[in-house]
Amino acid sequence: MKILHVCAEFYPLLKTGGLADVTGALPKAQVEQGHDARILIPAFPAIKAGVTPTDLVREFDSFAGRVTLRYGHYEGVGIYLLDAPHLYDRPGSPYHDSYQHAYADNHIRFALLSWVAAEMVAGLDAFWRPELVHCHDWHAGLACAYLMAKKADYPVKSVFTIHNLAYQGNFAAYHLPELQLPYHYFDPNGLEFYGQLSYLKAGLFYADQITAVSPTYAQEILQPEYAYGFEGLLRDRYHQGRLKGILNGIDEAIWDPRQDKLIEQRYNKRNLKSKIENKAALQAEFNLTMSNRQPLFAVVSRLVYQKGLDLVLARLPAILASGAQFILLGSGDDNLQQAFEQLSQQPENQGNIAIHLGYNEALSHRIIAGADVLMVPSRFEPCGLTQLYALKYGTLPLVHHTGGLADTVIDSSEDNISNKSATGFVFYDCKVDAMQLAIDRAGQLWQNQRSWRQVQQQAMSKNFSWHESAKQYLALYHTLLG
Ligand code: ADP
């Protein structure tokens, strides 16, 4: 099957979050399963530098200026690079400048990406046309609208995946004439959203099929508290059978403690002693007291309200006072950054807390391998990947019961420990007290190292490989294509 993925991030070349992990892994898994899956992505500097050599596919004029389409490969996956330096030749984030200000021309930058996706269906590459276009997040949402406008001539199917409904790509309505879209698409039954153009809504409304990145999130977004005003549309689409949750997987070529070159000692579930060496190396690296008696709690996350890290902050003095250690790798909200740093500077916490602000891929591996507990108390979490990595590494996740966290972590309740299903710690009410009870359960289990190891082994036995998820996407594509 010929599948075109349309996206703005791609691991390992350009990543701001889990979206990149997915677009880096899903097409690769589809290629490994014998399909011709390719990616269309703007030629951001990191993409251009990472995908070489490339061949010229076409040079043409568009509503967004002169464009060159080039084609190359990355680890066996074909990549179309949409090269328009006046739009994409900007370092750093694909979405905003170094002051975190969204680029003023984002409406054009991502409309062009979507328009070119639809032109691919109409034969922009004379040698390859997709049978199905798979659009990721609002950045590619408009592609579903452009494809709908071409449907009579090119009845290609579109899939739109919601990686996070919190990011919507809303733009002033007066941009409509710049986008080469039928004017009547600006309608409540279309891509109009409270007087604005919503690229996310274009995806939700015009896609032949919507997917969300976990079954629980697919249900949650039918409720107003998770849906940002899209609950009505999402419920309609759900009742039409057009919304489905498919859990993300993990790329085991990158995240596997048996072969991870970024960690101190490789290990498996029968050799958990080597995991302890990773903990010791991490403690040494961050001047933490060298001890395996103290459980090491960790966070690897963007520091944003969604992630619930203010709850962790509120309990951190108590966590440390209980004799545990804590390490955080993250960046984002200034207030959170400062508050964590302040705690790390208090004399009584020395040797038990390490805060590393910033983005560091290799360190994220060392932390996930070396810690005992990974905290993911997100208020909502479409899928979440770090808890999947943690399970695979025998680092027990402590999570709020929401979205993909609810679908992947099983609480260490007494029942679940005795029936051997426990894999982590789960709390249901996203409040400090409920989280504290889960921390207490972790503390109790830590006292019984045999049970702890058993839960680790159960966690490590879980299979979240992309192959399973890729199969589900393919089954969906087949249903769509009849
Ligand atoms: P989101 O996409 O909302 O950020 P996910 O859990 O789906 O959350 O994906 C986050 C990805 O980003 C994971 O691969 C995680 O390891 C990585 N990550 C988050 N923060 C950092 C950081 N500061 N340094 C390195 N990797 C990080």
Image (cartoon, rainbow, N blue to C red):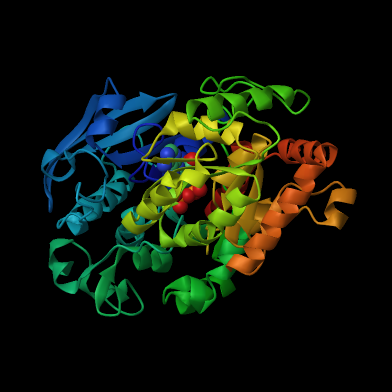
- Residue 96: x and y in percent read 23, 51
Q: Quadrant of residue 165?
A: bottom left
Residue closest to the eye, 61 or 370: 370
Question: Viewed as shown, does residue 377 lie left or right of 345?
Answer: right
In the image, farthest residue toward the right? 418
Residue closest to the eye, 272 or 97: 272
Q: Is residue 283 above or below residue 20?
A: above
Question: Viewed as shown, does residue 46 lie left or right of 289?
Answer: left
Q: Is residue 209 above or below residue 69?
A: below
- Residue 265: x and y in percent read 61, 19
Question: Viewed as shown, does residue 179 lie left or right of 283?
Answer: left
Q: Residue at x 40, y 34 (%)?
A: 360
Numbered disc total: 0
Whether residue 132 is visible to the viewer of this picture, yes or no, is: no
Residue closest to the eye, 359 or 143: 359
- Residue 103: x and y in percent read 18, 54
Q: Residue at x 36, y 46 (%)?
A: 7
Whether residue 465 is visible to the viewer of this picture, yes or no, is: yes
Question: Viewed as shown, does residue 309 lie left or right of 109?
Answer: right
Q: Quadrant of residue 391?
A: top right
Q: Is residue 461 above or below residue 194?
A: above
Q: Is residue 474 above or below residue 202?
A: above
- Residue 21: x and y in percent read 46, 40
Q: Residue at x 46, y 55 (%)?
A: 163
Residue closest to the eye, 482 or 157: 157
